[in-house]
Image (cartoon, rainbow, N blue to C red):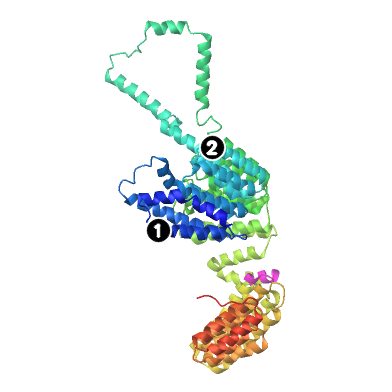
Amino acid sequence: MAETVQYRLERMVPELEEFERKGLFSKVEIKSIIKKRTNFEYAIARRIVKKIDFLRYIEYEMNLDSLRKKRKARLPGMALPDQDESERLSEYAIKRRINGLFKRALVKFNGDVSLWLQYIEHAKRSKATNILSGIFVSALQYHPRKATLWILAASWEFEDNANPQAARVLMQRALRLNPDNQSLWHEYFRLELLYVEKIKMRRRILGVDEKSLEQQRQEEEKRAMDLDDADENTIQLPTITGEDVENWNNESDERKTVKKMEASTAEALKEGVNPILTGLLAKIVYDNAIEAIPSDLDFRTAFVDIYRMFSDPEEGISHVYETILRDMPNNPAARSYLAERHLFSKVKQTTENDTSKFITGSDPAYIPAIKAIVEDYNVAVKDVPTAEMFERYTRFLIDQLGFTFEENLQLYFAKVLQRAFKLARKADVSSARLYKNQIDYLLEYELDKTKSVAAKAVEQYPKSPDLWRMKITFSMIDSEEELFQQAFKNCPESFDLWQFYVDCLGNRWNAIVAAQQDMDAKTQNLDKTYMRACEQVTMLLPSVSVATDERNNVKDMVLCSYVRWAKEAGGISAARTVYKKIIQNLYPTYGFYQTCIDIEKGEQGSEALEHLYEMATRLNEHKQEMYQTYIGYLREQKKFKKADHVLWKASKEVPGFELASK
């Protein structure tokens, strides 16, 4: 190892001498550079080498090269281009070393994609175009399934190397190896559209596109008319020589054939006739893509978003819509997308997720677009009379109704909504979400019918937490608790339903405080209600079960709410009574202990807080984190002896326990 390191250091001598001769680095700095490089070389020459050692060495060399450039720019006469071999050595030696370090690192860690990406980025930044092609080849040999590398290689060939044919070959090869990769299909599609866009731009600059030629023709006609108007008594005749007449008479068949070919070529180059300029290649890519990935709607709609970033996308977008309707006629999501396409703006987009892609309510095209959408939705619900189809239809109308402030439009949406719900009842189609949409509409416009519809909905779909919440909202306060208990029997694991229950308990407490009547009795009743809720979630949602994390979220929320309410209602003593009772009987989790600790931190006295820490460290989850927090607290309180004891205990219970670094 030492011989190899010494050999590499000796190869640095010419460049270091050149640095010193030019005054870029002093003797002391040169010695420091040698020392640093020696340490790095020994680090990366070890038997078990780490990637971080290579990255630190590379970072050091990059910083050194940056410093060299800055000093060179400041020195007089150094800004001129280097001429002799030694000058070129000082200019490129560090860059060559960085490239060599990347190569050596990738020999050891060729499976690390992030390292390949860093190498590619460095080569691009240093404009090392002569080695980029080789880097991409090597990277793709090791990682042919990584779409990112294929896309980067094709992008470099197309944009930086100005070789669209090579970029196309790369994307085709990538798709042969990864036919199910959606990002590759999208980027290949974008590549073909970019190719056509560049050709169109070049034709516009040269003035040979259809608009420019039409403008030239109009200018010539206008010029001829101006000449006619200038001298009405003069007949303008073209200048014809005898030689021209003789050539016309003696024109050969070959010449006539050439003229016909020129005319046909000119006709073929027109944008409206040339299939390449009309986007044929992109269309072929899209057809092949949906053949490889046939049933993904989001995959197809992404092509529309890409189309909209280029000029003249109408024909291509229409083709995408046709294929969606052809291949997914019974898919509610597809029919919904096709119906709502009329709201898409025709303005060219800057990005795929541009928010200006939709027509606004103030746009004159908004009303015709809404009418077209309603017509398409009416056809869709006839063709696909499913609950999901009606859900999408009614949700769209409710959303638009919420965005609209114009009275006539609101009436229009309301009538269409009523008709949609009526159609659903006629088709005997219903679902919990459809009922929810109907109740959302009735809340705003027909409140008197809301309660009966909510009751009917819960009766038909008792497992829907949203419908239970709506029914409870419209019920009398006296029957609220009974309805909640019925809801919990049907939906015991619904976090939203339990959260709604806790919010209602909070509202009850606010009403008690506002009334200031029989507060003690009402507070005791509310305390019993909280305790009963805690017992329910403990029995319904045991800590040791499937989906423990999700269920413990419900348990934590209810138990923590109880403790917070107790603190608000009776102070810290009441909160301590509550959490001690919970700890003793209800097997709380890490989240509950954390809440109690946060409450105690705001109070005087450390005994209760230390008791909570001791109890929390008995849990199997988050043990290391809790021990670290506990030890940190004890050291803040200057209880070093107890902190050492807890540290010893933690090292026994948690393998490899380490204190968190500050």
Q: Percent from the top left, x then y, of residue 580?
A: 61, 90
Q: Does residue 353 show up? A: no
Q: Percent from the top left, x then y, of residue 163?
A: 52, 37
Q: Does residue 534 show up? A: yes
Tag 2: Cα neighbours inside 10 Å, few (<14), some, or many (≥20)?
some
Q: Which residue is mark 1?
A: 29
Work out whether 231 lies above or below 492: above
Furthest-right residue in this view: 545
Task: Give amino acid for label 1.
Answer: Glu
**In the image, which disc is placed on residue 164?**
2
As helix, strand or loop, the secondary structure at mark 1 comes to helix
Magenta range: 456-467
Tag 1: Cα neighbours inside 10 Å, few (<14), some, or many (≥20)?
few
Quick check: 607 left or right of 234?
Answer: right
- The structure residue drawn at horizontal position 60% and vertical position 55%, both measured from the top left corner, is 112
Q: Percent from the top left, x then y, of residue 478?
A: 61, 84
Q: Quadrant of residue 136?
A: top right
As helix, strand or loop, the secondary structure at mark 2 comes to helix
- The structure residue drawn at horizontal position 53% and vertical position 11%, both measured from the top left corner, is 254
Q: Quarter of the image containing the N terminus?
A: bottom right
Work out whether 475 lies above or below 197: below
Most prominent secondary structure in the magenta stretch?
helix
Quick check: 488 left or right of 365?
Answer: right
